[in-house]
Image (cartoon, coloured by chain):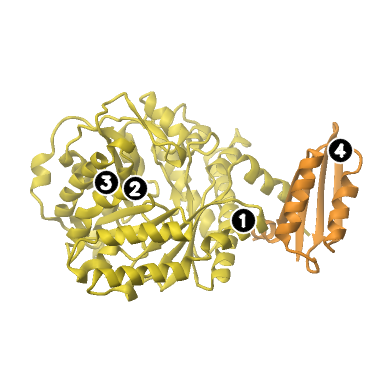
């Protein structure tokens, strides 16, 4: 017997609290498309993705209809293109064009995997791919790119860190007529997960099966209103409330993922239970922290409340499903979160506090607008700091900075849509040039020697 | 298999009759109805069997949604599995 209260609660979550399936992402291996001729390889990539993903959007729409829960994005992630392009011995930009074409053909929102994994060093094709990223992102609309520059096992590749500072800046410059949007589709990772369904960092990692369905669920609004109903609870009780809510959200994701995988005749991978905010009111992670008891996100207490939130979300998620993976936790993208935008505008939330928050959240410095005059070495040094947090704490960290070309502190950048808007944040003026020019590697920490 | 229909809006003559006629037209058996009216606000939860429907759940849902628009009421149709998944351990 279905309880009436449960029915009303579910409908309320979807109608009023923005519960949705944020993404169904099909991971597709392109390893069998490798060919020394780039044209033949591109043809194989196009055919394989078309064949596997032609029904993805339809299947998702049917499931959304059946269960009455919105599925916001349908996406594809592919094997990092540097692996596929390495034996062609030329710039992989043609792969970007073909991925763009196939994304349009399949009707998906994004395709991720214009990526390279260089945590221990560059192999054939990696540098060519990284150098082509600004062009790929400037000339396409659907492609997302990521580069993994460090890991707990390998340390941090500082040559790649130095290179990525230049690449991010160049990407922003090449898309300066479109609010520097290219940089919003480029993520630099430490400990990148192989099965992340969220963009811009999704790629189909080595070791994954040929094709797989991963699902990302969201629901900051649901957690927010659950906490709002209990104004006098202590922190132990708050943790329980979040766990119970996360359980329900994860189960919805699990149902959708299992059904999509069955309909598409491929295995179900993971549910990524991430509280992914949007700029809409009532869909903010910062507002959850403020509901717990902060006057403004960024004030003292922010790191502690975020740590509790992130951990409780994971605990509720793993109780609900044995297939929880990806990034799972709470995202803190500045421009995509109404509460973060407010806190950044009024100066409570600064980049230093955000860095501390990334030590306990599920990803990292995300969607932060920085002055257009920021030097590549400053960007690189921010990446190095963030990667160090990930490397030492054995967690994923990421950097997605948007240098706002021709804009300075106090001005704003507005992307519109889910990417939102935000003020240019201060990154300081002291130069880390010598540190970044040294190159080499920050060796893997002692934590890597677990054997 | 079952689906849940929820109806919310201003009370008026003929709501139950209109919804149940659509169910009958689609050969869907009504298993349970729970209805209340508070301050002229009509609320109904109906559980139906969808095993022997003569059309797809999608078409049935679209039909009910258009009926809802005519009546000025909010109508949801959802497969029971979403509630079972989210609320049962």
The location of residue A397, given as percent across then percent down, is 32, 50
Whichever of callouts 3 and 1 sits on the residue coming sooner in the sequence is 1
Q: Residues within 10 Å of mark 1 (few under 14, many from 20)?
A: some
Residue at 33% x, 76% y: name it. A32
Whether callout 4 and callout 1 share a subunit is answered no
| Numbered disc 2: secondary structure | helix
The answer to whether the residues at label 2 and label 4 have Cβ atoms under 8 Å apart is no
Q: CA distance from mark 2 to mark 3?
A: 18 Å
Q: Is residue A9 left or right of residue A313?
A: right
Residue under pointer 4: B37
Residue under pointer 3: A386
The location of residue A95, given as percent across then percent down, is 30, 62
Q: Residues within 10 Å of mark 3 (few under 14, many from 20)?
A: many
Chain A pictured colour: yellow
Residue at 42% x, 67% y: name it. A49
Disc 2: which chain? A
Is A202 in front, or is B72?
B72
């Amino acid at each position: 017997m279905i309880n009436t209260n449960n029915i009303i609660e579910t409908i309320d979550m979807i109608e009023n609290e923005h519960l949705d399936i944020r993404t169904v992402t099909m991971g597709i291996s392109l390893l069998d498309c490798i060919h020394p001729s780039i044209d033949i390889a591109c043809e194989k990539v196009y055919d394989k993705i078309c064949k596997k993903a032609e029904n993805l959007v339809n299947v998702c729409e049917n499931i959304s209809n059946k269960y009455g829960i919105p599925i916001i994005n349908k996406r594809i992630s592919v094997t990092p293109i540097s692996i596929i392009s390495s034996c062609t011995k030329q710039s992989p930009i043609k792969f970007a064009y073909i991925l763009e074409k196939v994304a349009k053909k399949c009707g998906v929102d994004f395709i991720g995997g214009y990526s390279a994994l260089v945590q221990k060093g560059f192999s054939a094709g990696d540098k060519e791919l990284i150098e082509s990223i600004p062009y790929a992102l400037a000339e396409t609309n659907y492609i997302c790119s990521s580069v993994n520059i460090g890991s707990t096992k390998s340390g941090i590749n500082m040559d790649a860190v130095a290179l990525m500072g230049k690449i991010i800046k160049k990407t922003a410059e090449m898309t300066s007529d479109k609010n520097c949007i290219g940089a919003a589709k480029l993520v630099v990772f430490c400990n990148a997960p192989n099965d992340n369904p969220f963009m811009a960092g999704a790629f189909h990692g080595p070791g994954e099966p040929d094709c797989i369905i991963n699902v990302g669920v969201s629901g900051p609004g649901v957690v927010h209103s659950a906490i709002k109903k209990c104004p006098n609870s202590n922190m132990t009780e708050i943790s329980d409330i979040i766990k119970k809510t996360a359980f329900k959200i994860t189960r919805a994701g699990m149902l959708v993922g299992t059904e999509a995988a069955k309909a598409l005749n491929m295995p179900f991978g993971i549910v990524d239970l991430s509280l992914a905010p949007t700029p809409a009111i009532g869909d903010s992670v910062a507002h959850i922290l403020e509901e717990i008891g902060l006057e403004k996100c960024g004030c003292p207490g922010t790191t502690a409340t975020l740590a509790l939130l992130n951990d409780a979300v994971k605990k509720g998620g793993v109780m609900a499903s044995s297939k929880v993976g990806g990034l799972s936790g709470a995202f803190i993208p500045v421009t995509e979160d109404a509460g973060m935008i407010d806190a950044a505008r009024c100066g409570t939330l600064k980049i230093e506090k955000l860095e501390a928050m990334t030590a306990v959240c599920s990803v990292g410095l995300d969607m932060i607008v920085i002055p257009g005059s920021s030097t590549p070495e400053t960007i690189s040094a921010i990446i190095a700091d963030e990667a160090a947090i990930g490397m030492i704490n054995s967690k994923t960290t990421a950097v997605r900075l948007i240098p706002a070309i021709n804009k300075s502190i106090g001005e704003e950048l507005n992307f519109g849509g889910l990417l939102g808007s935000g003020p240019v944040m201060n990154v300081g003026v002291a130069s880390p040039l010598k540190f970044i020019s040294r190159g080499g590697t920050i060796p893997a920490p002692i934590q890597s020697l677990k054997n | 298999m079952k689906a849940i229909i929820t109806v919310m809006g201003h009370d008026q003559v003929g709501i139950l009759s209109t919804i149940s006629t659509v169910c009958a037209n689609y050969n869907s058996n009504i298993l349970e109805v729970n209805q209340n009216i508070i301050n002229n606000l009509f609320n109904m939860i109906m559980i139906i069997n969808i095993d022997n429907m003569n059309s797809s759940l999608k078409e049935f849902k679209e039909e009910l949604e258009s009926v809802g628009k005519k009546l000025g009421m909010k109508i949801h149709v959802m497969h029971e599995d979403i509630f079972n998944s989210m609320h049962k351990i």
